[in-house]
Image (cartoon, rainbow, N blue to C red):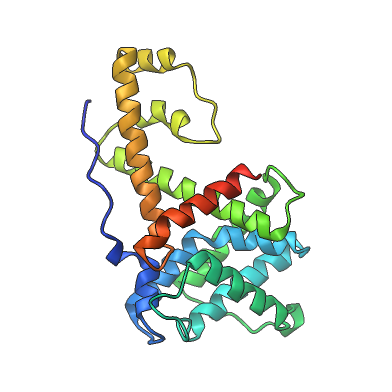
Amino acid sequence: MNQPLPPGPRQFTTTRWSVVLRAGGLDQDQSRAALEQLCRDYWYPLYAYVRRKGHSPEDSADLTQDFFAKLLAHDFAQGLTPQGGRFRSFLLTALNRFLINGWQKHQRQKRGGGTFTDSLEALIADRGEVEYLAEASHHDTPERLYQRAWAETLLARALERLAAECVERGDWRFDVLRPFLSAGEDPPALADAAAQLHLTLAAFKSLLHRFRQRYRELLLDEVGQTVGSAGEVADELRGLLQALRAS
């Protein structure tokens, strides 16, 4: 099935972090929904950061959940401006304040229930410690681990979106091309992959180029979801890729 790839990502003005920043401290449903989705997507780097700070798996899970519950229960956009920077930096600053301000186990407030907090608790319980134990290095500082985990989460989200697009249009070629797109997989020889798809080597290289191009578009869109302006996308991506190379 030789189907074209879908069009490029949506415009920057609809991104989640810019929606939060535009709220200007007002408790708007749209802004809260945008923040909830960002937190759902990027909870793991915070869990890894808290773990690397020396907390136990149980305390790290509780602290991460408490932090997000507190963030969403308060006027989270207070003091933010449309030029309020990057979600990655905002979260780490807010988390450090949360940890410094004495939110130890015996001081924690009871978390309120709800769809978001319940689903986040299930995510952390199911994947938090498993992913932490699978980290390639356990000698990174908490800050370096946070940056690397954020970058890896970003790449994974872009790849998941590309996979979902392929499933939606019934394009099974993604299964063959995925190892060439994911940094964590060892791809087969180009000729072997081309044979799987019954393509010449030249045709396979052309197809792979189109998939890589679409993957990059989705990656840039994912970055755009977490920064406050279109001008920050390239710098943010560059910094995150540097964090991966430094690991």
Q: Nearer the viewer, residue 67 or 6?
A: 6
The residue drawn where x is 30% and y is 61% is 12
Residue 144, quarter of picture? bottom right
Q: Count how many numbered circles sit on residues in the image.
A: 0
Residue at the image point whose x is 35% and y is 62% from the top: 230
- Most foreground residue, 124 or 209: 209
Identify whether 236 is placed above or below 174.
below
Asked if 192 appears above or below 14 in the picture, the reply is above
Residue 244 falls left or right of residue 168 = right
Image coords of residue 84 (percent x, y): 45, 75
Can you give x and y, in whole percent of width and height, for residue 184 in the image? Answer: 56, 35
Between 101 and 64, the one lying in front of the other is 101
75 lies left or right of 28: right
Name the quadrant of the N terminus.
top left
Q: Is 220 placed above or below 181 here?
A: below
Q: Is residue 125 left or right of residue 85?
A: right
Q: Going 42% across and 43% down the picture, which residue do you hit?
A: 159
Say whether residue 172 is visible: no
Is residue 216 in view? yes
Report which quarter residue 134 is drawn in: top right
Query: Residue 53: image x %, image y %?
Result: 75, 64
Q: Please provide percent x and percent y for residue 21.
A: 39, 76
In this view, 187 is above or below 146:
above
